[in-house]
Amino acid sequence: MQRSIIEAEERLERRMVQHTERKITEVHQFLDAFELRVLARPAPQVPDSEAPSAGLAEDTVMAALFATFEIPKPPPRENAKRRRVREEDEAIARKKECREMEAARRASIADEEACRIRAIESAAGESSSRNMAIEGGTADSVVGDEDTTEGVQITEVVSFGEPDPPAC
């Protein structure tokens, strides 16, 4: 990990040096072009009191050299390809294993519950169940409910809850 940090710092330092050198060459090119234009023109008659100071020119050159707003961004491929370290991979594997164990535990609990319910139902057998038969039409239906424990037939009338219209 330390080695990768050192390598990253060295790469950054090399890029900064290259950027600074490129800026210096650009400034030299601008200065050369400026000198050629100045030499090509006839010299104007300017009184010494109105001549620009040399300090202002130095400030302009220094500002052009060390302008930080144009530092190039790294290519998008380097930015997007973030390398994972071994600890991150192991943490991801542990989390995945924990999720799988939790899912298996929940499935096991659900299976045990279903098995327990089936065992209770099979132990109770047919004696506690009820057979229902629906007979009828569209308006009112008759439900024939047979209680198998006692063998007695119970009949219930089922309707939609609307009273019958009065017969005139």
Image (cartoon, rainbow, N blue to C red):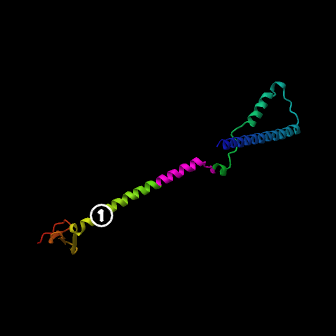
- Quadrant where the image shows the N terminus: top right
The image quarter containing residue 119 is: bottom left
- Is residue 97 in view? yes
16 or 146, nearer to the observer: 146
Report the predominant secondary structure element of the magenta stretch. helix
Percent across and percent down for residue 38 are: 85, 37
User: Which residue is label 1 attached to?
Assistant: 119
99 is higher (above) or lower (below) than 168: above
Residue found at x 57% / y 48%: 88
In-image side of 136 versus 100 (left or right): left
Q: Residue furthest top?
A: 49
Residue 156 drawn at (x, y percent): 16, 69
Residue 5: image quadrant is: top right
Q: At label 1, which amino acid type do we have? A: Ala
Image spot of residue 106 (x, y percent): 40, 56
Q: Which residues are magenta?
A: 80-99
Vertical order, 151 against 49 (above or below): below
